[in-house]
Amino acid sequence: MDIPNSRGRNGFWEAYRACAEENRVRPDRSPFYVNWAKDFANFLPQKPLRDRSRKDVEAFLANLGKRRGIADWQVQQAQHALKILMRSSCLIMRLKDILAVPILKTAPFKRQ
């Protein structure tokens, strides 16, 4: 994963949980979504989350489907969890606050 420290990692996963709930995941189920997203992050530990592709998601889900004891509904839940992880604009906005990094709406430029 590419989150620099423990505080940042915890904040990232808390932001993800909140985004999952904003995407109609019930609060009692959001911890499962966090676990699927963490499992995906650990699936390719050498590759930062920001660099993951659709193929990485597909490979993870295929691997998950082959695991003993994993039902089809769990693979579907994991797929939904990763959709939120990879496409959620609310996560980007929450990370801005966690990492104290300004997110610019337009590219900066210098006036001459």
Image (cartoon, helix red, strand yellow):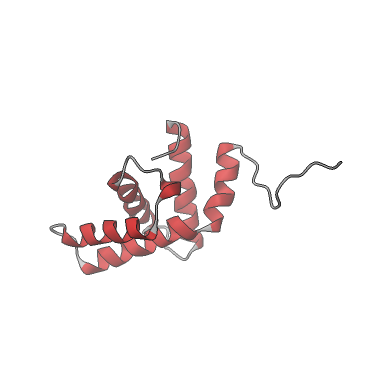
- Res 78 → quadrant: bottom left
Task: Spot the residue most to the top.
Answer: 5
- Res 69 → quadrant: bottom left
Q: Which quarter of the figure is the N terminus placed in?
A: top left
Task: Spot the residue most to the left.
Answer: 68
- Res 100 → quadrant: top right
Q: Position of residue 47 (x, y in %)?
A: 36, 43
Relative side of 88 to 40, left or right: right
Task: Name the residue located 68 percent from the left edge and 48 percent from the top edge.
Answer: 104
Task: Name the residue located 23 percent from the left edge and 61 percent from the top edge.
Answer: 62
Q: How many marks can you see?
A: 0
Relative side of 77 to 6, left or right: left
The answer to whether residue 41 is above or below residue 62 is above
The answer to whether residue 72 is above or below residue 42 is below
Q: Position of residue 102 (x, y in %)?
A: 65, 42
Q: Which quarter of the figure is the C terminus placed in?
A: top right
Q: Position of residue 3 (x, y in %)?
A: 44, 37
Task: Spot the residue most to the right.
Answer: 112
Relative side of 9 to 35, left or right: right
Relative side of 31 to 12, left or right: left
Task: Name the residue located 59 percent from the left edge and 50 percent from the top edge.
Answer: 93
Q: Position of residue 45 (x, y in %)?
A: 32, 41
